[in-house]
Image: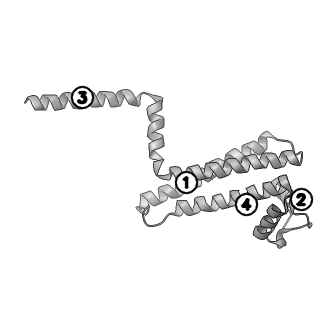
Amino acid sequence: MQNLNTVTVTITQVCTKILQAAKMPTSWLLALLMYFQPIKDTYILLVIVVVMDFITGVGASAKRKIPRSSSRFKNSIIKCFCYFGAVFVFWQFEIRLGLEHVIGTYKVIAGFIAIVEIISILENMAVITGNPIFLKIVRLIRGRAREKHGDLIGDILEEKNGKYPKI
Protein backbone atom coordinates (compact mmCIF):
# COMPACT_ATOMS: atom_id res chain seq x y z
CA MET A 1 0.00 0.00 0.00
CA GLN A 2 2.87 2.32 0.80
CA ASN A 3 4.40 1.73 -2.64
CA LEU A 4 1.10 2.71 -4.27
CA ASN A 5 0.99 5.97 -2.29
CA THR A 6 4.61 6.72 -3.26
CA VAL A 7 3.85 6.12 -6.94
CA THR A 8 0.72 8.29 -6.74
CA VAL A 9 2.68 11.12 -5.10
CA THR A 10 5.43 10.82 -7.71
CA ILE A 11 2.93 10.88 -10.60
CA THR A 12 1.22 13.90 -9.07
CA GLN A 13 4.55 15.72 -8.71
CA VAL A 14 5.52 14.95 -12.31
CA CYS A 15 2.13 16.11 -13.63
CA THR A 16 2.40 19.31 -11.59
CA LYS A 17 5.85 20.03 -13.02
CA ILE A 18 4.63 19.34 -16.56
CA LEU A 19 1.71 21.73 -16.10
CA GLN A 20 4.03 24.39 -14.67
CA ALA A 21 6.42 23.96 -17.59
CA ALA A 22 3.55 24.20 -20.10
CA LYS A 23 2.81 27.70 -18.83
CA MET A 24 6.31 28.89 -19.78
CA PRO A 25 6.92 30.19 -23.33
CA THR A 26 10.38 28.66 -23.36
CA SER A 27 8.92 25.19 -22.94
CA TRP A 28 6.62 25.75 -25.94
CA LEU A 29 9.60 26.91 -27.97
CA LEU A 30 11.59 23.87 -26.87
CA ALA A 31 8.69 21.57 -27.80
CA LEU A 32 8.48 23.22 -31.24
CA LEU A 33 12.22 22.80 -31.76
CA MET A 34 12.01 19.15 -30.78
CA TYR A 35 9.16 18.63 -33.24
CA PHE A 36 11.36 19.90 -36.08
CA GLN A 37 14.41 17.93 -34.93
CA PRO A 38 14.22 15.35 -37.77
CA ILE A 39 14.52 18.05 -40.44
CA LYS A 40 16.88 20.33 -38.52
CA ASP A 41 19.85 19.68 -40.82
CA THR A 42 17.77 20.34 -43.90
CA TYR A 43 16.56 23.66 -42.48
CA ILE A 44 20.12 24.61 -41.48
CA LEU A 45 21.28 24.02 -45.06
CA LEU A 46 18.43 26.14 -46.40
CA VAL A 47 19.16 28.95 -43.93
CA ILE A 48 22.82 28.97 -44.97
CA VAL A 49 22.15 29.19 -48.72
CA VAL A 50 19.32 31.72 -48.33
CA VAL A 51 21.43 33.98 -46.11
CA MET A 52 24.39 33.70 -48.49
CA ASP A 53 22.12 34.54 -51.42
CA PHE A 54 20.72 37.52 -49.52
CA ILE A 55 24.20 38.81 -48.62
CA THR A 56 25.57 38.40 -52.13
CA GLY A 57 22.37 39.91 -53.55
CA VAL A 58 22.80 43.00 -51.38
CA GLY A 59 26.44 43.17 -52.50
CA ALA A 60 25.48 42.87 -56.17
CA SER A 61 22.85 45.59 -55.75
CA ALA A 62 25.37 47.85 -54.05
CA LYS A 63 27.91 47.21 -56.81
CA ARG A 64 25.40 48.27 -59.48
CA LYS A 65 24.00 51.07 -57.29
CA ILE A 66 20.51 49.56 -57.25
CA PRO A 67 18.68 51.00 -54.24
CA ARG A 68 17.47 48.71 -51.48
CA SER A 69 13.74 48.71 -50.98
CA SER A 70 11.26 47.26 -48.56
CA SER A 71 9.42 45.49 -51.37
CA ARG A 72 12.56 43.59 -52.39
CA PHE A 73 13.18 42.65 -48.74
CA LYS A 74 9.54 41.57 -48.43
CA ASN A 75 9.98 39.34 -51.47
CA SER A 76 13.01 37.72 -49.80
CA ILE A 77 11.00 37.04 -46.64
CA ILE A 78 8.11 35.57 -48.65
CA LYS A 79 10.59 33.41 -50.56
CA CYS A 80 11.97 32.06 -47.26
CA PHE A 81 8.49 31.20 -45.98
CA CYS A 82 7.69 29.43 -49.26
CA TYR A 83 10.93 27.45 -49.16
CA PHE A 84 10.53 26.33 -45.56
CA GLY A 85 6.81 25.73 -46.07
CA ALA A 86 7.42 23.49 -49.09
CA VAL A 87 9.96 21.40 -47.19
CA PHE A 88 7.60 21.16 -44.21
CA VAL A 89 4.64 20.10 -46.37
CA PHE A 90 6.60 17.33 -48.07
CA TRP A 91 8.04 16.19 -44.73
CA GLN A 92 4.52 15.97 -43.29
CA PHE A 93 3.37 14.14 -46.41
CA GLU A 94 6.00 11.47 -45.82
CA ILE A 95 5.24 11.17 -42.11
CA ARG A 96 1.46 10.93 -42.54
CA LEU A 97 1.80 8.24 -45.21
CA GLY A 98 4.50 6.38 -43.29
CA LEU A 99 7.06 6.84 -46.05
CA GLU A 100 9.78 8.68 -44.13
CA HIS A 101 12.15 5.69 -44.33
CA VAL A 102 11.30 4.81 -47.92
CA ILE A 103 11.56 8.05 -49.89
CA GLY A 104 12.94 11.46 -49.06
CA THR A 105 10.88 13.86 -51.13
CA TYR A 106 11.46 16.73 -48.72
CA LYS A 107 15.21 16.20 -49.18
CA VAL A 108 14.80 16.30 -52.95
CA ILE A 109 12.79 19.54 -52.67
CA ALA A 110 15.39 21.03 -50.30
CA GLY A 111 18.16 19.97 -52.68
CA PHE A 112 16.43 21.64 -55.60
CA ILE A 113 15.95 24.83 -53.56
CA ALA A 114 19.62 24.74 -52.52
CA ILE A 115 20.72 24.36 -56.15
CA VAL A 116 18.56 27.30 -57.22
CA GLU A 117 20.02 29.43 -54.42
CA ILE A 118 23.59 28.37 -55.24
CA ILE A 119 23.03 29.38 -58.87
CA SER A 120 21.74 32.72 -57.63
CA ILE A 121 24.83 33.10 -55.40
CA LEU A 122 27.08 32.39 -58.40
CA GLU A 123 25.17 34.95 -60.48
CA ASN A 124 25.55 37.52 -57.69
CA MET A 125 29.27 36.76 -57.41
CA ALA A 126 29.60 37.21 -61.18
CA VAL A 127 27.98 40.65 -60.84
CA ILE A 128 30.07 41.61 -57.79
CA THR A 129 33.46 40.49 -59.02
CA GLY A 130 33.11 40.30 -62.78
CA ASN A 131 35.58 37.43 -62.47
CA PRO A 132 35.71 35.30 -65.63
CA ILE A 133 35.48 32.09 -63.56
CA PHE A 134 32.07 33.03 -62.15
CA LEU A 135 30.92 34.18 -65.58
CA LYS A 136 32.01 30.86 -67.14
CA ILE A 137 30.25 28.83 -64.44
CA VAL A 138 27.05 30.84 -64.85
CA ARG A 139 27.23 30.54 -68.65
CA LEU A 140 27.76 26.79 -68.30
CA ILE A 141 24.71 26.44 -66.03
CA ARG A 142 22.42 28.84 -67.86
CA GLY A 143 23.58 28.03 -71.36
CA ARG A 144 24.34 30.58 -74.03
CA ALA A 145 20.79 30.44 -75.35
CA ARG A 146 19.60 32.43 -72.32
CA GLU A 147 21.85 35.39 -73.17
CA LYS A 148 19.70 38.03 -74.81
CA HIS A 149 22.04 40.94 -75.41
CA GLY A 150 25.44 39.27 -75.22
CA ASP A 151 25.92 40.85 -71.77
CA LEU A 152 25.48 38.13 -69.17
CA ILE A 153 25.69 40.48 -66.19
CA GLY A 154 23.13 42.83 -67.73
CA ASP A 155 20.80 39.89 -68.40
CA ILE A 156 21.15 38.65 -64.80
CA LEU A 157 20.38 42.10 -63.41
CA GLU A 158 17.41 42.44 -65.73
CA GLU A 159 15.95 39.16 -64.49
CA LYS A 160 16.62 39.89 -60.81
CA ASN A 161 14.93 43.27 -61.07
CA GLY A 162 11.78 41.73 -62.55
CA LYS A 163 12.30 42.94 -66.11
CA TYR A 164 11.65 39.64 -67.79
CA PRO A 165 11.45 39.54 -71.56
CA LYS A 166 7.99 39.00 -73.02
CA ILE A 167 7.40 35.53 -74.39
Near mark 2 (Cα within 10 A), the count class, few <14, some 14-19 or many ≥20, is: some
Q: How far apart are marks 2 and 3 (CA)?
A: 69 Å
The residue wearing badge 1 is: 42
- Residue 163 visible here: no
Three-letter amino acid code at the position of disc 2: Gly
Q: What element carries label 3?
A: helix
Question: Mark 2 or 3, which is nearer the eye?
Answer: 2
Task: Note whether residue 63 is visible.
Answer: yes
Mark nearest the camera among 3 and 1 is: 1
Work out whether 104 lies above or below 21. Answer: below
Marks 1/4: CA–CA distance: 18 Å
Quick one: label 1 or label 2, which is nearer the N terminus? 1
* Residue farthest along the left direction in this orientation: 1
Q: Mark 1 is on which residue type?
A: Thr
Nearer the observer, 75 or 49: 49
Measured as percent of width and height from the top left, residue 152 is found at 87, 63
Which quadrant of the figure has residue 136? bottom right
Q: Mark 4 or mark 1, which is nearer the start of the sequence?
A: 1
- In the picture of the structure, the residue carrying the numbered disc 4 is 119
Report the disc number at residue 154: 2
Q: Where is residue 37 in the image (x, y as percent from the top left)?
A: 47, 48
Image vertical order of residue 125 relative to residue 137, above or below:
above
